[in-house]
Amino acid sequence: MANIDDDDGVFVERRSRQMESFAIYRKLKAVVDSWNREERGKARVAAAALYGLLAWFALLAAAAYFLPAYALPVSIAGFLVWIAFVAVMLESI
C-alpha cells in the first residue's frame, strides 16, 4: 500500500513540475511576442514618419517654387502637422 502512495506522490510532483514549466514557458512566450509586436509597430511608425517627412519636403518645395511668399508659414505649419502625425502614430502602438 505504501508503494502505491509513493508512486502517486512521484506522479503528482512530476506533473506539477511539468505544469509549472509550461506556465513559465507560456508567460515568457507572451513577453517575447509582445516585444516582437512592439518592434513591428516601431518600424511601421518610423516608415510612416519618413514618408510624412518626404511629403512635407515636397510640399515645402512646391510652396517655395509656386508661392514663395507663403513658404515660411507652410514650412512651420507642415512641421507642426508632421510632429502631430508622428505623435498620433506613436500613440497607436
Image: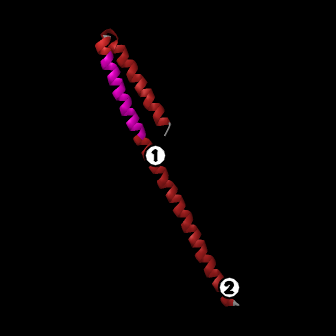
Q: What amino acid is found at the position of numbered circle 1 in the picture?
A: Glu
Q: Residue 18: x percent and y percent?
A: 56, 71
| Disc number for residue 60 | none
Q: Residue furthest top?
A: 69
Label 2, residues with CA under 10 Å away: few <14, some 14-19, many ≥20:
few
Number of on-image labels? 2
**Quarter of the rendering containing residue 40:** top left
Q: Residue furthest left?
A: 65
Position of the N terminus by quadrant? bottom right
Which residue: 58% across, 76% down?
A: 14
Q: As displayed, is residue 91 above or below residue 66?
A: below
| Disc number for residue 38 | 1
- SS class, disc 1: helix
Q: As displayed, is residue 87 above or below residue 18?
A: above
Q: What amino acid is found at the position of numbered circle 2 in the picture?
A: Asp
**What stretch of residues is rendered in magenta?**
44-62
Q: Residue 25: x percent and y percent?
A: 52, 63
- SS class, disc 2: helix
Label 1, residues with CA under 10 Å away: few <14, some 14-19, many ≥20:
few
Residue denoted by label 2 = 5
Q: Residue 64: x percent and y percent?
A: 30, 15
Q: Residue 55: x percent and y percent?
A: 36, 26
Residue 49 within the magenta-colored segment of the rendering: yes
Which residue: 41% across, 27% down?
A: 83
Which residue: 59% across, 69% down?
A: 19
